[in-house]
Image (cartoon, rainbow, N blue to C red):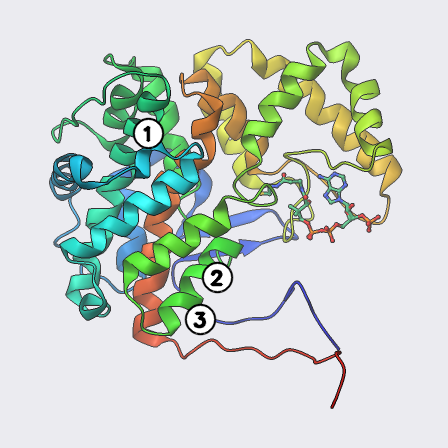
């Protein structure tokens, strides 16, 4: 029988992360996501996931990641029109492809060169996304400062001034929280590409394409649109019922694996609190109303808030424009994808499932 969504199909043994959908638990490289987000800067989390995937730890330092941001800045003039593309995910995927010329090529698919390519891509992603965002706004790009933390530099390159400490801490917590999530659609994409022994950069470019869709990483922009459309808590129920009656899904609700609230929603809700976002009380009210309506209309399926719900509130509160939400997810997840590519290269087989032919026979 066809299992079109591949639910429950195990395609890899991994040491990178584990999702328990029944209990709402996420373990990343041996730590609970709550603990990791609170205690670990992004650069240290990058090192944790990459080493869990089998990379050596020594080259993965904040200085190396800062150096990779500086190297990506030098590449900007050679990206052609990549950063003119209207969609940030298209821009990021196309720009990342240019890294192949600098060490991530097919010959560097396996071994230490893949780790070098991973650091190059992790450093490049925020530089490319921030430059794309500023170009869209008609502003010149801002050069990275390799001495800053990754989250601080990404914000500075986007908004053009030294961001305040609480915004940096919130963004850092976000980047750590979404760094990896087991066999998500984009991670599976990366692993399928890596399983052919294609180079790491090609796997990342494919994963960016998979993350773009609204059922995966493209949801937080629409979540913010929804909060804007609802405007005040009293309007939530009527607006949400209208969406469901029109056959549309509530963005930021539901998950393929979680049958309870996504634990990352709680982590992000906590991380955004110090920013005193005016949208936070509205988001809480909308979440409650959505959970109740979905309980009533879809009693057979447990549908609760997923990571994207509070991603929207947090990224908005730190000052990022909504078109940059999905690319910001990629700025973090690129580390998880890289870890999976390294692990797949080390331990995996060619991933090649089957299909059932239901067409005409000769
Ligand atoms: N709003 C309304 N109904 C939803 C829903 C949502 N957000 N999510 C799932 N459902 C319903 C489906 O309509 C379906 O109902 P039906 O059986 O009456 O047709 C049922 O729940 C199962 O949906 P299905 O599409 O099989 O679940 P899935 O595992 O493939 O979907 C998501 C998981 C994430 C794609 C889905 O919950 C969704 O589209 N959420 C909104 C987008 C989003 O927030 N994406 C970010 C994910 S991190």
Image quadrant where residue 81 sits:
top left
In terms of secondary structure, where does tag 2 sit? helix
Query: In the displayed structure, would residue 236 be above or below residue 110?
Result: above
Q: Is residue 270 left or right of residue 158?
A: right
Ligand 1 falls in quadrant = top right
Query: Which residue lies under the disc numbered 1?
Result: 132
Image quadrant where residue 14 sits:
bottom left
Q: CA distance from mark 2 to mark 3?
A: 13 Å
Query: Which residue lies under the disc numbered 2?
Result: 188
Q: Is residue 221 left or right of residue 333?
A: right
Query: Which residue lies under the disc numbered 3?
Result: 13
Q: Residue at x 15, y 44 (%)?
A: 61
Residue 226 appears in view? yes
- Total tally of numbered discs in the picture: 3
Tag 3 near tag 1, CB within 8 Å: no
The answer to which of 37 and 211 lies nearer the viewer is: 211
Q: The C terminus appears in which quarter of the rendering?
A: bottom right
Q: Residue at x 29, y 51 (%)?
A: 97
């Amino acid at each position: 029988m066809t299992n079109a969504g591949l639910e429950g199909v195990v395609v890899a043994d991994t040491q990178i992360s584990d999702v328990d959908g029944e209990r709402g638990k996420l373990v990343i490289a041996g730590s609970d996501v709550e603990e990791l987000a609170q205690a670990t800067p992004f650069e240290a989390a990058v090192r944790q996931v990459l080493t869990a995937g089998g990379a050596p730890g020594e080259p993965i330092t904040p200085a190396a990641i800062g150096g990779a941001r500086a190297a990506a800045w030098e590449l900007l003039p050679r990206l052609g029109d990549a950063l003119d593309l209207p969609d940030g995910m298209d821009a990021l995927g196309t720009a990342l492809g240019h890294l192949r010329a600098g060490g991530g090529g097919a010959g560097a698919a396996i071994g230490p060169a893949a780790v070098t390519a991973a650091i190059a891509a992790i450093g490049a992603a925020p530089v490319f996304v921030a430059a794309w965002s500023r170009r869209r706004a008609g502003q010149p790009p801002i050069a990275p400062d390799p001495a800053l933390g990754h989250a601080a530099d990404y914000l500075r390159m986007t908004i053009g001034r030294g961001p305040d400490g609480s915004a940096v801490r919130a963004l850092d917590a976000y980047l750590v929280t979404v760094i990896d999530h087991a066999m998500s659609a984009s991670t599976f994409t990366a692993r399928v590409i890596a399983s052919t022994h294609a180079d790491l950069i090609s796997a990342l470019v494919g994963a960016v394409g998979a993350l773009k869709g609204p059922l995966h990483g493209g949801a937080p922009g629409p979540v913010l649109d929804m909060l804007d459309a609802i405007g005040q808590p009293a309007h939530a129920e009527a607006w949400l019922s209208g969406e469901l009656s029109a056959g549309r899904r509530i963005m930021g609700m539901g998950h393929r694996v979680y049958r309870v609230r996504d634990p990352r929603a709680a982590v992000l809700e906590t991380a955004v609190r110090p920013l005193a976002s005016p949208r936070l009380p509205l988001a809480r009210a909308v979440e409650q109303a959505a959970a109740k309506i979905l309980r009533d209309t879809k009693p057979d399926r447990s549908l609760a808030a997923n990571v994207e719900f509070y991603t929207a509130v947090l990224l908005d509160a730190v000052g990022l424009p909504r078109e940059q939400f999905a690319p910001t997810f990629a700025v973090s997840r690129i580390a998880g994808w890289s870890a999976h590519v390294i692990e797949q290269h080390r331990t995996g087989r060619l991933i090649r499932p089957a299909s059932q032919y239901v067409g005409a026979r000769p």
